[in-house]
Image (cartoon, rainbow, N blue to C red):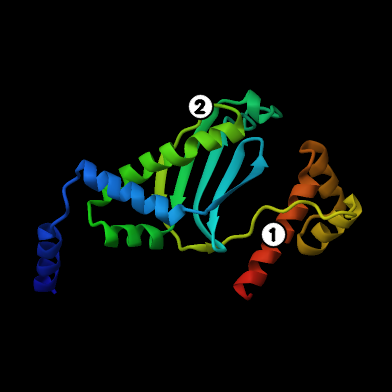
C-alpha cells in the first residue's frame, strides 16, 4: 500500500502541465465559447434576497449562478425590495463533467482553469446579468465545481385560467401546509402562493423528464 501511494504521488508531482500563455488563454476562451454557444439563460426570483440564473443547452443545465442580496430579517421584518438592498454575494456553479472535459482537452492546472473560466464568465455573461438586474454591483464571489449535469426545466408562468383557489388546493395536496398557514405566508410575503404553486409544477416536470 505504501509503495502504491508513493507511485501515485510521484505520478501526480511529475505530471506535466502546459504553462499559461496568451495562446492557451485564447484556446480556453474558444473552447468555452463553442461549448456554451446556443445556451439559453433563464432567471428566476426566489425571494427579494435571492435570484437564480440557469444556463441550459439541449435540455441540460450546464451552469448556474445564484446571487444574494442583503437580508436583515434576523434582526427585524425586512420587507425591502431587491433594489433597496445591497448586493451580498454571487456563487457560480459548473458541473464536474463539464470541467473535467475542459481539463481533458486543455491540460493546465485546475487553479488557472478556474481563473480563466471566471474571467470568461465576467466577459461573456456578467454584463447581461447586471442588465437584467438593473445594477452594476454584481460580481462572482465564489466559483464551485460540483454535481452532475442536470435536466433543465425553464421557469414557468401561471397557466391561463388558474385561480388562487386552484393553486392553494395543489399546495394543500402536495405539502404539509394547512390553509391558515398558507394564507399567513401569503400575507407576510405577497406572491408566495403563486411562487410555491409554480415551483411544484416545475419540480413535477423535472421528475417527468428524468423518468421518475
Can you see residue 2? yes
Quarter holding residue 130: top right
Image spot of residue 94 (x, y percent): 43, 53
Q: Viewer-proximal residue, 168 or 90?
A: 90
Q: Eyeballing the image, is 122 above or below 176?
A: above
Counting labels gives 2
Q: Viewer-proximal residue, 77 or 204?
A: 204
Residue at image position (22%, 41%) is: 22
Image spot of residue 180 (x, y percent): 86, 48
Crowding at mark 1 (Cα within 10 Å: few <14, some 14-19, many 20+) = some
**Left or right of 27 in this view: 162:** right
Residue at image position (9%, 63%) is: 10
Label 2 belongs to which residue? 137
| Helix, strand or loop for disc 1 | helix
Can you see residue 141? no
**Left or right of 132 in this view: 105:** left
Q: Eyeballing the image, is 96 above or below 2?
A: above
Image spot of residue 53 (x, y percent): 56, 46
Q: Which mark is residue 202?
A: 1
Amino acid at each position: 500500500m505504501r509503495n502504491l501511494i508513493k507511485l501515485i504521488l510521484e505520478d501526480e508531482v511529475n505530471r506535466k502541465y502546459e504553462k499559461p500563455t496568451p495562446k492557451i488563454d485564447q484556446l480556453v476562451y474558444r473552447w468555452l465559447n463553442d461549448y456554451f454557444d446556443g445556451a439559453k439563460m433563464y432567471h428566476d426570483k426566489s425571494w427579494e434576497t435571492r435570484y437564480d440564473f440557469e444556463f441550459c443547452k439541449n435540455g441540460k443545465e450546464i451552469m448556474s449562478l445564484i446571487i444574494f442580496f442583503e437580508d436583515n430579517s434576523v434582526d427585524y421584518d425586512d420587507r425591502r425590495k431587491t433594489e433597496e438592498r445591497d448586493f451580498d454575494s454571487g456563487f457560480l456553479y459548473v458541473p464536474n463533467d463539464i470541467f473535467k472535459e475542459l481539463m481533458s482537452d486543455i491540460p493546465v492546472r485546475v487553479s488557472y482553469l478556474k481563473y480563466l473560466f471566471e474571467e470568461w464568465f465576467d466577459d461573456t455573461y456578467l454584463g447581461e446579468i447586471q442588465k437584467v438586474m438593473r445594477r452594476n454591483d454584481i460580481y462572482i464571489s465564489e466559483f464551485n465545481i460540483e454535481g452532475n449535469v442536470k435536466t433543465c426545466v425553464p421557469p414557468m408562468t401561471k397557466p391561463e385560467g388558474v385561480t388562487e383557489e386552484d393553486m392553494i388546493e395543489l399546495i394543500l395536496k402536495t405539502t404539509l401546509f394547512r390553509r391558515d398557514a398558507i394564507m399567513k405566508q401569503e400575507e407576510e410575503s405577497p406572491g408566495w402562493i403563486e411562487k410555491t404553486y409554480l415551483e411544484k409544477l416545475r419540480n413535477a416536470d423535472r421528475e417527468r423528464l428524468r423518468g421518475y
